[in-house]
Amino acid sequence: MTGTVRTTCPYCGVGCGVTVQNTGTKPSLTGDPLHPANHGRLCSKGAALGETLDLTGRLVAPRLGGLEVGWDEALNHVAERFRTTIREHGPDSVAFYVSGQLLTEDYYVANKLMKGYIGSANIDTNSRLCMSSAVAAHKRAFGEDLVPVQYQDLECAELIVLVGSNTAWCHPVLYQRIVKAKERHPALKIVVIDPRRTPTCEIADLHLPVRAGTDVWLFNGLLSHLHQQGCVDQRFVTEHTAGLEQALSTALDSSGEIETVAQQCGIQSWTVEEFYHLFARTERVVTAFSQGVNQSSCGTDKANSIINCHLLTGRIGRAGMGPFSITGQPNAMGGREVGGLSNVLAAHMDLENAHHRQIVQQFWQSPRIAAREGLKAVDLFEAIHAGRVKAVWIAATNPVISLPDANRVREALRRCELVVLSDCVANTDSTSFAHVLLPAAAWGEKDGTVTNSERCISRQRAFLPLPGLAKPDWWIFCEVARRMGFEAGFNFASAVEIFREHARLSATENVGSRAFDIGALSELTREDYDALLPRQWPARSTGEQDPIIDSRLFEDGRFFHADGRARFIATTPRPPVHPPDDLYPFILNTGRNRDQWHTMTRTGKAARLNTHRPEPYVDMHEKDALLSGLRAGQLLRVRTQWGSLVGRLRVSGEMPRGMLFAPIHWSDEFSSDARVGSLVNPVVDPISGEPEFKHTPAQVEPFVVDWYAFALSRRPLSVRHVTWWSCTQGEQFTRYELAGRGRQQHLSRWVKQLLNAPEEPTDWLEYADAGSGVYRAAHLIDDRLDACIFISPRPDLPARAWLSALFAKNGLDEADRTSLLAGQPLGAITDAGPIVCSCFGVGRQTICHAVRKFRLTTAQQIGHRLRAGTNCGSCLPELKGILEEESSLAVER
């Protein structure tokens, strides 16, 4: 496959376009300048996609009981085991757990098989973990799961409120669109509502560090304030909404005066007052919310409390305004469209609606249809644990890492009679429990569609051949369905055939009763599908040449409840299900790192993405650390009722008192003890089923070790016997962070074994200071650095960045050898410091040196000198932080 291919990024819900130049060797990837989501920009992860395409670690053949087999044997086994389980225990004894990494066509076939042919709704998705509260809120307010805002609304808004969203790190390209909009229109105001002072706050005019879980108090207070100040679009409310009286009464009862809100939220009264006044006097307001709202035991109410304020003011359905759910995964929206959640049907139809069930069953000509809601993600794995679900098929996800109370999930899979797992990665924390492994296509090999956060359908096009026996997910589901006796319903030969059926179903008996309608795309030829440009839905067919395309939802004030009105929802603030106490005094908050994605099976391959936050860490307030007997750089253990982890302590200045933050990415493949999911509180929102990832009571304690170390090696090291370890992929080496207890009596021998060096290596450099406990060693082969290790009783080991340059050399000179023994760069060698700009590999020390030498005062000046911050812009908040620090140091000097 050669030439230029336009496809879509596989990371977050922004849905950026990617242009691939495929010359037959290594593909070259850039942002697609014609895609409406990103206009050519890519974040650091997207820019590094070309570095993740190798076949290392790929699953390329079916495995049955750990042995490679052919497709027929594997598929027949899966079909027979599912058939037998259903016959003996009923349809609800089996389940699918799928993923926002699937394409819409994959999702459609899986949902059709489970709900329409097996006859159970036990199909849920890891998207339940990130956006199902928004889905539930949309359905309650609008009558359908509808996102009314478009990205361009961010560029014509006068006020953008970011709630529970570290947009700068989690949706970087969208963040850059906001940054550019503010540069063009300095009057644009940005409010960030988040307990942490994240990098997103760098562009904020106002930051409200609310106490975790108090969003409903804040927005109920805003609703009351807007009403009291007369900021009500009376015509809109009267003609297009219902339920205001009860919602307003509840808000007044719970929030009352600004002082009450401030007290409940743990912030100063003037910040609440300023936010309320900004919202009240600004017409064009977009309130964008993400996981800080959704991932909560009251996430649905949080989202509805936000929507209520937009309904009261009529700030919805028009340019530059509206509530905006920013989804986490690349195809979370597409999965919602085809019924990937256990409580909905395909094409935005409802399981509890008998007429909708009839429409879908007749359209599919299926033998049965699920008649009741299936098990949501957390309940699904609890049912597996209890033995009620006896066979599960997991596709494109790693639940042993990502679900809450993950140790129980691991035990559930260990108990399960049949675990089928289709994935592109051979070894994950979840694949080890699979009885059957099915090799699926990866990004770059997949052909289909995805839908982003603004309802824009984009093509994901293949530009690489399928390796080994790997197959598309839709093909795997169809083949099992046929072997189960359902040939007629799954006789698809290509993704376009599935897409056409999906589009036809969306238009079936839909004369405006459902907003999701892409009937205009139901007759696409293969050529049309291949050439399909990004487009928003709805796209209703008129029978004429041109379809009706309504990209602006609710412009006419019509919603999708039976009476055409939107609903105000009364939201009562609720305390957390598990509040902190004397035993667990801290609140653990979880989330993403800037340069990593999920469990690092893809981003972990890109060396430059592993330099920004290269090891598991826990961030906490400096005073909390001091009172806990901890210092930055030390290891600490975090415990909850459900599990524990060990990570490096960071004191970033971002955290409020009483809160901890740990990233979600670390699995057993990359660390000895850092699975955040094993700690997370398994309580869920009672409406959406979304777990409480942002509020788990926790305790901390020092993780006492006798020595700290790091090792860099061209070859994999066996480190699982070390007390604590983590690893990441570097450029031509793997980086290991280590810590241990006890002293090695024969340290040199132990190190040689660890580094895979012979007992009498021909080129071995070694330095030992018995008094200080410092030890350094390096193994060279043909003058090239093969491996090195640095050991100290203190955590403040030498910088790692400068060693990368030594691994890039074909041979080391005397100065290089001396620097290894000295533990620091000498002479011409310089240490760039920890990487700040991943796109161009610019380190902190390099930036600080340039700021001082050239007296730089702006991020733009840094970009002009070093290119840092000129690509994806994810590092701009850190550049500004460096400028502030250097300015303070200059004053002191």
Image (cartoon, grey):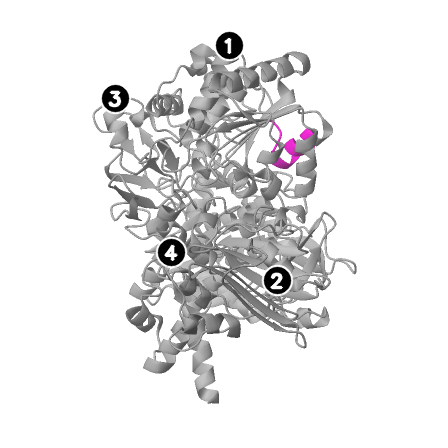
Marks 3 and 4, how far apart at CA: 37 Å
Residue 612, given in percent of the width and then of the height, sits at: 47, 61
Q: Measure how far apart labels 2 and 3 are at the Cα level.
A: 62 Å
For discs 2 and 3, the disc positioned in front in the rendered view: 2
Whether residue 641 appears in this view of the structure is: yes
Q: Position of residue 255 (x, y in %)?
A: 63, 57
**Which label number is shown at residue 648?**
2
In the rendered image, the residue lying farthest to the bottom is 893
**What amino acid is labelled 1 in the image?**
Gly
Q: Quadrant of residue 534?
A: top left
Amino acid on which disc 2 is placed? Arg
Element carrying mark 2: strand
Q: Which is more N-terminal, label 2 or label 4? A: 4
**At 33% across and 67% down in the image, what residue appears?**
186
Q: Which residues are magenta?
A: 373-384
Q: Residue under label 1, please give it.
A: 485
Per the image, the residue denoted by label 4 is 284
Q: Is residue 355 magenta?
A: no
Look at mark 3 in the image and give the residue it sits on. Answer: 543
Which residue is pictured at 67% across the width and 58% down the height?
587
Q: Earlier in the sequence, mark 1 or mark 3?
A: 1
Disc 4 to disc 1, C-alpha distance: 55 Å
Count of numbered tags: 4
Above or below residue 739? Residue 664 is: above
Q: Is residue 381 magenta?
A: yes
Q: Residues within 10 Å of mark 3 (few under 14, many from 20)?
A: few
